[in-house]
Amino acid sequence: MSFFEILDQIGIITFTISGTRLAFSKKLDPFGALVMGGVTAIGGGTLRDILINQPVFWLQDSIPLISIIIGFGATIAFRKKIVSIKRTLFIFDTIGLGVFLVIGMEKALEANLGPIQAIIIGTMTAVFGGVVRDTLSNEIPLIFRKEMYATTCILGGILYLVLGYLSMPLWFTPLITILTVISLRIISIKLNLSYPQLGNRD
Amino acid sequence: MSFFEILDQIGIITFTISGTRLAFSKKLDPFGALVMGGVTAIGGGTLRDILINQPVFWLQDSIPLISIIIGFGATIAFRKKIVSIKRTLFIFDTIGLGVFLVIGMEKALEANLGPIQAIIIGTMTAVFGGVVRDTLSNEIPLIFRKEMYATTCILGGILYLVLGYLSMPLWFTPLITILTVISLRIISIKLNLSYPQLGNRD
Amino acid sequence: MSFFEILDQIGIITFTISGTRLAFSKKLDPFGALVMGGVTAIGGGTLRDILINQPVFWLQDSIPLISIIIGFGATIAFRKKIVSIKRTLFIFDTIGLGVFLVIGMEKALEANLGPIQAIIIGTMTAVFGGVVRDTLSNEIPLIFRKEMYATTCILGGILYLVLGYLSMPLWFTPLITILTVISLRIISIKLNLSYPQLGNRD
């Protein structure tokens, strides 16, 4: 497996844990939780591949499906720890966010998209699984609600492009971008950062 | 029309009836009911064709659209019977489930996907229309809620693959698979089967 | 820019204003409002391009993204007027509806789809952004609720096909279709037209 393929599996496992954990806290049955975990994990990449007109990654390759089973199994095995600790969802979600941003941008740049489009595709790859998860759970998606969730991706995406122009070693740019996304998320939670609301009330 | 094309129209008509019936019970107007019926009927196949990168079936061929009109007309014509009998939604939904599973798997295998991917695509073809229907109606989709809805498809999908390796006559494998899906659904309703819940409460 | 490209930008700007305005009235933060405006503006065209298997328009071309920024900026700049006047949402939504219907039908006919499919694709282009907007806001989409919203598109689509057969000058057919859609929407609101409900109560 290449460096990016390994990263991809890490993202899939962590997003599966994040989705499965939410499903259990919503009292879905194990099968529903597996589907919810899987959708959270591969929803973003599936949308990305459809938009950039590439073969959908998990149709050609069974490794992502195995990663979903691993993430699901891990949540079941450690569910007392994973489900009860509130911070867990945040940690796994944040690692997945950084990893999927990088993978999505890499694929978009390979498909010769412009820099703005690459950031949008990268951000969609990172957040879309969670949007589907929240929509299916009948909630307004997290991305629209708080904590500069998607803004973090956009800032990470800009950093990724800048580092890319500086011809760093292959592993450097993705690693720094992922660590930056994780740090920005932790900072915005700690400082309780959010945008001001501009609208009126209905 | 080939055997599979006839099956496909049966699935489209029954899913249209299932979707339209739900729309009327939600007090949608006739046009909204037609759209809801149509989305339920062709949503799964549309997702399938997009994922496996085939031309979307109802764009090349108007017969599916005629089948939707037939299903819609039948619901209007017999609406006192169709809408009032609670069991009706279940029956039509279940026939459609089996038929679309078989069609989806057949198309996935033709596109050279692996067996696990074929089961996933077949199950998506069968359940996605209903997921969109429920999401648009602002409900948590049925698939996540009860009665081993999607599990039935997966079991049916495994049977379909096994029978396929035994080189049965063309009509035998789909027919047995569809009848098995219908039987499994009836059994799981009668016995009130469901998965245990593993999660904690929020 | 060609005539249709100019029309497209008008539709994107008006739909962005419509989506952003709703987001502010739902108290989303500015970034969430930008995403909601953007999804409303390009959701329909994205679905269209995926269904007819064309490159997604905003991936090849940054002008639509600039139009979203313009629409978003206009809503912020004039938000006291735009957000408070109830009629504003209606006006911008209706202009976008007519424009996107025409663009969607034009692209579908170029892709050699049949007339019924062209009307469906045109109507989807016009209404799908709003459906996603409403689903993400956790509401039953407007299209299913009232005022013959989608019916207007279908009538406009039929008119577009009829005028197309009469070989009018290039600008005439789209312009008359868009004006007809706007007029039909105003009439159906003024006369409070809606379909009778046929269903029973649950």
Image (cartoon, coloured by chain):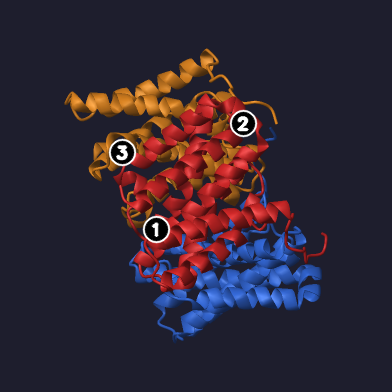
Chain colours: A red, B orange, C blue
Quick one: SS at disc 2? helix
Task: Identify the residue at the far top of this view.
Answer: B191
- Mark 2 residue crowding within 10 angstroms, few (<14) / some (14–19) / many (20+): many
Kind of residue indicated by mark 1: Trp
Q: Quadrant of residue B183?
A: top left
- From the viewer's perspective, is C138 left or right of A131? right
Residue ID for mark 2? A83
Q: Secondary structure at mark 3?
A: helix
The residue nearer to you, when weighing B139 against B118, is B118
Work out how far the residue at label 2 is from the one at label 1, CA to CA, in angstroms.
33 Å
Q: Which residue is mark 1?
A: A171
The residue located at (76%, 78%) in the rendering is C78
Tags 2 and 3 both on a single chain:
no
The subunit carrying tag 3 is B
* Res B48 visible: yes
Q: Quadrant of the C terminus of chain B?
A: top right
Say left or right for C195 vs B146.
right
Element carrying mark 1: loop
| Residue C103 shown left or right of residue C88 in the figure | left
Q: Are marks 2 and 1 on the same chain?
A: yes
Q: Can you tell which of label 2 and label 1 is closer to the viewer?
A: 1
Across and down, in percent, residue A35 comes to 49, 35
Q: CA distance from mark 1 to mark 3?
A: 54 Å
Left or right position of C34 against A42: right
For disc 1, the chain is: A
Q: Looking at the picture, tell me which residue is in the foreground, A135 or C161.
A: A135
